[in-house]
Amino acid sequence: MKKLLILVPVLCSLAFSADATAGKSLDDQVDPGITDGTAVREFRQAREKWLGQGIADYRMKAARTCFCAGPFQAKITVRKGKPVKISNRPWYGPRTVPGMFRIISQAIKRKVAVLDVKYDQKLGFPKKAWIDYIAMAADDEIGYRIKNVSPLKP
C-alpha cells in the first residue's frame, strides 16, 4: 500500500510534466507542410498551372470520403467555370476544380493538423486532398479525389 501511495503521485507528476514540456498539445498540432510553407508553394504552383491551361469547360469525377452522409461520388460537367450537371444530388464535395482549390486554401488558412494533397503533374488540378482538422478529434477527417478531368469543346 505504501508503494502504491508513492507510485501514484510520481506517475501523475511525470504525466503532467511531459505534457507541459511538449509545448503544444496535440489539439494545437499543425501540418509541417503548412508551417514550413511547402503546402502554400505547391498550392500556388499547381493553381497557376491549372489557370494557365485556360480550361473552363470540362468533365470530372469527384469523390468524398468522410464520416458523413452520402452521396460519396459524382460525375460533374462544368461549362464556363460553372457546374451544369451533377450526377448525384445533393453533392457536398467540390463541384469544380477551383472549388477543390478553395477547400485546400481554407485548410491551409485554418492550419489543420494534417493536409495531404497530390496535384496532377500535367494540368495542375488537385487529384487528392486528405484533411484532418484536429489531431485528436474523432471523425473530423475528410478526403476528396478528382479524376478523369476531360476538357470539353466550348
Image (tube, rainbow, N blue to C red):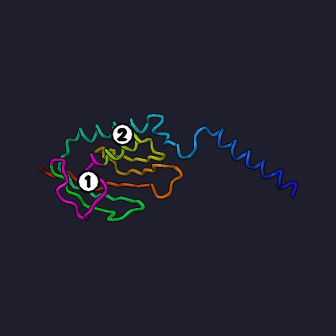
Left or right position of 13 against 92: right
For label 2, the residue is 43
The residue segment tinted magenta is 80-99
Question: In percent of the image, x 73 and y 45: which residue is there?
Answer: 14
Magenta span: chief secondary structure: loop
71 vs 140, nearest the viewer: 140
User: Height in image: 59 above or below 36?
Assistant: below
The image shows residue 54 at horizontal and vertical percentages of: 19, 41
Mark 1–mark 2 distance (CA, rounded to whole Å): 18 Å
What amino acid type is highlighted by mark number 1? Arg
Residue marked by disc 1: 95
Q: Quadrant of residue 47?
A: top left
Task: Give the quarter of the figure containing the N terminus.
Answer: bottom right
Residue 116 within the magenta-colored segment of the rendering: no
Magenta stretch: includes residue 89? yes
Residue at 20% from the left image edge and 45% from the top image edge: 55
